Amino acid sequence: MTHVISIQSHVAYGYVGNRAAVFPLQRLGLEVTAINTVQFSNHTGYGAFTGEVFSPDHLKDVLDGVESLVGLDGVDALLSGYMGDEGIGRAVLESVDRVKQANPAALYCCDPVMGDVGRGFFVREGIPQWMRDHAIGRADIVTPNQFELGFLVGRDIRTLEDALAATADLRAKGPKVVLVTSLEIAGDDGEQIGMLVDAPAGSWRIATPKVAFEVPPNGAGDFTAALFLAHTLRAGVKDEGPARALEQTAAAVQMLFEHTHRAGSRELAMIAAQHDIVSPTVTLHAERLR
């Protein structure tokens, strides 16, 4: 059975971080070991929350326990998301080293959570630079949004050509595959939002209708990165594997958004959408760009 370690934040209520990643990975049939970097009552977008941030030593201690119990040679991938500070970031990369030492074929998927269009950066000062200079080059798969991609390569992304140049620049830093999780570019009608994947065998894009949320739900990027990793582990990074992973991921995201919109909730409707996460009722086809 495919085994993933997911190192992310945890909330008691709602679906962000590991709460947005672990359940869909499990529904897709993967074994998941969740290591939490924080435990909060709810995500910080609500303004008020309780809980605590765990130390890097806590993260290492938990991984030590897992390794002593079952080893790390059966781990197929490690997924990381929001990193609260550089200490946690270093602990994550040490975890990547340990997993890859045990299984050199294991993949590291880094979701470089830093900011978004319209919001700017929402992480601690220094984290974006640390992510760019240390984490990205160690990853096999990177899943930035448009804002994060632009920062990581120092480019303004306004056109499709800009986006393709940016993903090529990012892959030159080390990652095999780059998934841009949200892309709005000049020439689009403003009613759709795109996802783009760039890999050694080519680049593909899918555009889906925007969903008009009164309050956009948090956690969609965490969900998307987890789904894309799961489908990449099945389809592979060679040939058209990334295109197939993009199609399955985009379809599941569209279905999740539709369920969430119908529910009128600011939390992702993960339970209501669980069957569509596994077998989306919509079929999407990736457009080959190169």
Image (spheres, grey):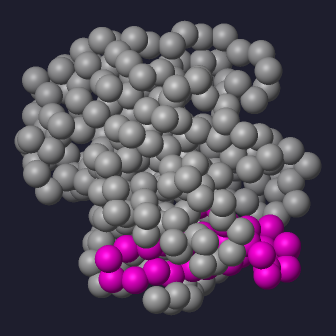
Q: Is residue 243 among the parts visible in the rendering?
A: yes
Position of 219 with respect to 47 (left or right) is left
Q: Main secondary structure of the magenta part?
A: strand
Q: Nearer the viewer, residue 246 or 143?
A: 143
Say if the magenta span includes residue 198. yes
Residue 229 figure quarter: bottom left
Looking at the image, residue 239 lies above or below residue 245: below
Q: Magenta part of the protein: which range?
A: 181-210
**Residue 6 percent across, percent down from the top left:** 37, 39
Q: Residue at x 79, y 26 (%)?
A: 46
Apparent side of residue 261 relative to residue 147 in the rendered image (left or right): right
Residue 262 appears in the figure? no
Which residue is at a point 65% across and 52% down the rendered structure image? Answer: 147
Vertical comparison of 41 with 190: above or below: above
Q: What percent of the width, then of the height, locates residue 212?
A: 88, 60
**The quarter of the displayed image where residue 134 is located:** top left
- Is 173 left or right of 18, judged from the image as shown? left
Who's the residue at 58% across and 70% down the image? 163
In what quadrant of the picture does the N terminus appear? Answer: bottom left
Report how many numbered discs are placed on residues in the image: 0
Residue sitting at x 15%, y 44%:
100
Image vertical order of residue 225 relative to residue 132, above or below: below
Q: Position of residue 141 (x, y in %)?
A: 37, 57
* Residue 112 drawn in magenta: no
Residue 228 placement (x, y as % from top left): 45, 62
